[in-house]
Each structure stands twice: as structure tokens, then as C-alpha cells.
Amino acid sequence: MSDLLERLRDRGWRLTAQRRVVAEVLDGDHVHYTADEVHARAAARLPEIARATVYNTLSELVSIGEVIEVSTDGRAKRYDPNARRTHQHLVCSGCGTIRDVHPSGDPLAGLPETERFGFTVSDATITYRGTCPQCAAG
């Protein structure tokens, strides 16, 4: 379970009913919803929530670093609340399901000095691709 709600409270982020329901929808392990999926789930809990409110809240959560925006293969952006623990993503090439993975080792170590072209590398994003069990069975 992610600690998104706790992190937002610790920041003193104003948790209106709308913001709270968006954060509740995003809270959890392996959560990678699109904005429309967040809106649908939030509206099930708070029917009067506007789509614009969801989009604005997601944008603010990304801008304050509490949610990561994930884009894969030209699909709709997804929102990941696992912003505090270093991880990579495993993506199904069929259905687009995303899972957080925690490979061992330092991904920066895999890039030799000769391939850094003078850059001071501070971060590496690796996306593992494959076929999930449901797509493989289908």
C-alpha cells in the first residue's frame, strides 16, 4: 500500500473532499490509472466531482512530486503514487498493464563512461516489456 494520504497530510496539503477522494483512488500498490479511470473511480465515491477537478488535482500532485506521470508506447498517461521508492516498470505489450518492479543493482552502473558523452547522469528509467499471464493465455 502506498502512503500517499499520509504524505499529503504531512505536507499540510489541503485535503478537500475532492482532493481526498482522488488521493484515496490513487493510494495502493501497483496503481497506474489514467485520468479517466481516476475520475470514474472518484465519481463512484463522490458523484459530484468534476473531471476538471480530477485533472487539476493530478497535475498538482505531479508538480509537487507526490505522484509520477507514466507514459508508455503512446498510450494515455497513467499516474503512479509510488513516488518515494525507487522502482522501474514492467508493462504488458498486449493490454498495457503496468506493475512496479524493484530490480537489484544500480541501473546507472550499466552505462559505461564512454557512453555518457560528458553527461553527469543522475537518473535512469528502465521499462521492462513483456506479456502478462492473462494476455499470454488469451
Image: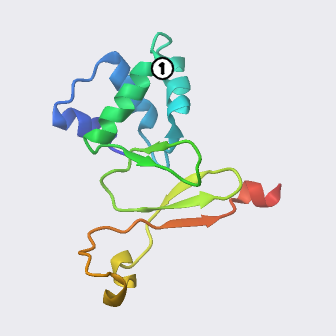
Where residue 5 sits, quadrant-wise, is top left
Q: Residue at x 34, y 17 (%)?
A: 17
Q: Residue at x 50, y 45 (%)?
A: 32
Instruction: Name the side, left or right, on which 83 lies relative to 35.
Output: left
Q: Amino acid at mark 1?
A: Arg
Crowd tier of the residue under label 1, counting other residues whose Cα lies within 10 Å: few below 14, some 14–19, many 20 or above: some
Q: How is this picture coloured?
A: rainbow
Q: Position of residue 90 (x, y in %)?
A: 55, 61
**Looking at the picture, does residue 106 appear above or below residue 29?**
below
Q: How many marks?
A: 1
**Which residue sits furthest right?**
138
**Looking at the picture, does residue 56 appear above or below residue 97?**
above
Q: Position of residue 74 (x, y in %)?
A: 58, 50
Q: Position of residue 107 (x, y in %)?
A: 38, 76
Quadrant showing the C terminus = bottom right
Q: Nearer the viewer, residue 74 or 79?
A: 74
Q: Residue at x 49, y 44 (%)?
A: 31
**Looking at the picture, does residue 137 appear above or below residue 22?**
below
**Which residue sits furthest front?**
117
- Badge 1 element: helix
| Residue wearing tag 1 | 51
Q: Nearer the viewer, residue 38 or 124?
A: 124
Q: Position of residue 135 (x, y in %)?
A: 75, 56
Q: Nearer the viewer, residue 114 or 97?
A: 114
